[in-house]
Amino acid sequence: MVDHESEGAGAAQELERALRRAVRGEVSFDTASRALMTMDASNYRRVPAGVVAPYDADDVAAALAVCRERAVPVVARGAGTSIAGQATGLGVVLDFTRHMRSIVSLDPDARTAVVQPGVILDDLRAAAGTHGLTFGPDPSTHSRCTLGGMIGNNSCGSHSVAWGTTADNVRELDVVTYGGERLRAGRGLDGLPPRLREALRALVDANLAPLRTGFPDLPRRISGYALDALLPEKGADVARALTGSEGTLGVLTEATVRLVDAPAARALAVLGYPDESAAAEAAHTLLPHGPLTVEGMAADLVAGATGLPKGGAWLFAEVGGATREEARSRAEALARAAADATTDHTVVADPAGQRALWRIREDASGTATRMPDGSEAWPGWEDCAVPPARLGAYLRDFRALMGRHGLRGTPYGHFGDGCIHVRIDFDLLSDAGIQVFRRFSTDLADLVVAHGGSLSGEHGDGLARAELLPKMYGDEMVRLFSRFKDLWDPAGGLNPGALARPQRMEENLRFAVLPGRPVDVEFGYPHDNGDFSAAVRRCVGVAKCRNESVSGAAVMCPSYRATGEEQHSTRGRARLLHEMLAGEVVRDGWRSEEVRGALDLCLSCKGCRSDCPVGVDMATYKAEFLHHHYKGRTRPAAHYSMGWLPLWLRAIATLRAAPVANAAAGVRPLALLAKRAGGIAPLRAIPELAPEPFTRWWRKRARAAARGGGEGGGAAAGPAATDPGVAPGGGGASAPGQPAAGASGPRADAAARSGGRAQAPTVVLWPDTFTNYLSPSVGRSAVAVLEAAGLRVVVPPEPVCCGLTWVSTGQLDRARSVMRRTLDVMAPALDAGLPVVGLEPSCTAALRTDLPELLGPADPRAACLADAVTTFAQALEDHAPDWQPPKVDRPVVGQTHCHQHAVLGDAAERRLRARAGLTGELSGGCCGLAGNFGFEQGHYEVSVACAEEQLLPSVRGADPAAELLADGFSCRTQLEQLADRRARHLAEVLAERLPRDPAGER
């Protein structure tokens, strides 16, 4: 019997060895590298034999030669954001994002640039922008898509109304064919090898009539091969004919592209309409006004979005001008001209305001993957296009067709070009659902053709639509497509199954390999009906996590930006988890070392939870994986040292051994020994423990208050008998809401202002591990500020913990036990409906999300505590709205904690800072320490790289008088260890400015 698996493995090993001998770039046939390339942003999955990252054009030619000799297919890949499956493939994947990503030259006078295929679009736009130029096509993935991928797909973007498709902006292409021919394609056939030149001339001459009449005339005709570009009256434009060929004809190694003048200023007219049909009918009427773009979307896509005028659907019409005033004037003129059909409008000339609105549109390719009820929706019919004047009628018919098939979707897109994007709630997990997918697709192809449209208006045909090209072009033209493919690639080695001789649309669906039943997991995954596979399926591959820089408060994905490696992106990790569940490429399940290696550099920052358009939560998936991976096995030392940190710190505090521990940490040999035993990076300093934990200070203060004064300077009376299981300190009062006997200063003043009229609100201050044992000054300052605001502060009578350190290290059984004990302690406060104020953002976020998602509905107290949790600033805003903070009047620098950004939001913090006169913005990104991550051995370099991205440069370049703010203990520690600067919590800054009462207490 022949062992075909062993035979295949031997052939793959021989192919790998041959490629390593032939090319200078990386050759990767390992499990992880293959798994990362199985999918793009489509519904499809094909498993490659290996991946080559060519160093230059010679490498491309050498790799093709090796594959040609062995009849191995080749697929060229950019950022992998294709939506029709054409960036997946068998054989060898050529990854151009590592090395071939240079802007070779840029000629501002000629308005051209020469680029390699791996150049990221935004990099080209930035380089051109220094000369007042830009590259016109701009897909929503502009921050990570590559020029090679755009040329392969003939991408368009929102500004094709003004500047056309990628094909309209390509001048020359340097290409290597599968047969080894190198050529430069432009206008005319002269630059081609004699064989190809004569064959193309014969093909065109013999088919002039069908080439002149067989292609619909519309701005977004992307489907099929652009054979009409070869007509003599069109200059035999070979470069244009190759653009959009999806890597099936040749491999691009260099491109000369056109640049256009970029408007000096832009303004956005946002026009409201009663409904989607009205917006679609109106879109083409705006074109005579010369807009740069006309984008459309309806309320079912942007529910909850702010800044939009009244209406049920909207058109975004952007115009340009030499100045902001001119751009605004043109936008207002356009809005006036459209006024008869609109319900309302707004004009936004402020760049920041425009970016916020465009972000709604650009994230739509991700947000549209979930229906309002949370069910899944998929691409597949993502970008059909019709003549713009027919868009309204087409959309009505399209909606009706979905209804007849029992499907739902949320159309949006390039209304000015007649191109509609939509994700549809196909059931691609069952045979019956897949048959509905096929029948609907066939019917929709007929509908598009009936309206004179193109099956693809932007993303190409790939594996999703190529089978249906005969409906659009007829059998004769499709036969010409096959002949055209054979002239360029007679061996059929380039991207087989796409465009010419396509596979059936239901073949190679990426869901087919996933488990048929839910996987047994620990977290509840409430947004995915408890199904871990569904949670992993959230990643549709739009790759926003591959952004190489972030702006504003964005966080995702710091480890990718630090390493530049796909496996350390959110998408890469999701792909590996997908393959782990599939069990075909990654075969070890939860024990997979490939998955563990990819998750190892995940900082658990939760940035993806908010910044990913589909809400992937890799921090939770990592915790889940680590739980299963190490179940029944010895864990890394760091899981015991830092995962159990709350217990170690509590023990030290109980023994009053903090001075001894601090002294030992200051002895280098002892510190190195402790770090080695605890799995801590040698270059990390061990943080100093506080000699007096916050809770001990609180109890002393309460006892002093009970004795009638002392340190608390507060009430003579002790805790009220009705206190709901929490211990008040010096601010307690026997008659809540009345000034405490003997009290004075700002707390008494605040109580006096409210005391005769209403009971002072009581809040529970959460004594998290980091505040309690490492930064008690934050807790003391928070008490001072909250009491100054007239609030009554109480603290849990026993130690409580959110369980975060156990969660982040995947020790979920222990985390669950800790959380339940905490709920037991907090039960009386929850029954009383008291708000719980968190000071450490990571712990507060854990209470808000990890606690209820790990304990689930079986323990309703978890949801109750999650609902009760609030931030320091939000508590002041909600429960002391009239309180005026002390004026600090200084600029600020520092960082918004990543968990604050991702889970809690920082709007209240921004407002509190503004009221206190703290001006300026905090940086985004992640500090890189991220709890245990930056302390763990092997993470130091990545941790520092993350800090160097935004945080450290912002601090170094700040005004010396600026207040350095960081509410997270990790952020403060990172600043202290890497920048030798002491940052403070907002509570500390405000407390410092509070007036002192006669007893000397703030």
Image (cartoon, helix red, strand yellow):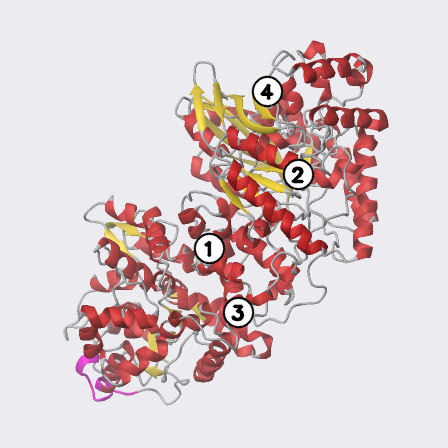
Question: Marks 3 and 1, Cα distance to the nearest angstrom?
Answer: 24 Å
Report x, y in % for residue 254: 53, 25
**Given the current orientation, which residue lies at the most extreme front position?**
1
Marks 2 and 1, how far apart at CA: 44 Å
- Identify the element where label 4 is drawn: strand
* Badge 1 density bin: few <14, some 14–19, many ≥20, Cα 10 Å: many
Rendering coords of residue 313 (x, y %):
64, 41
Q: Is residue 787 shown in magenta?
A: no
In the picture of the structure, the residue carrying the numbered disc 2 is 70
Query: Where does label 1 land, which residue?
Result: 607
Mark toward the start of the polypeptide (3 vs 4): 4
Closer to the chain start, of discs 4 and 2, is 2
The magenta region covers 704-718
Question: Where does label 3 land, which residue?
Answer: 629
Marks 3 and 4 close (CB-CB < 8 Å): no
User: Quick one: SS at disc 3?
Assistant: helix
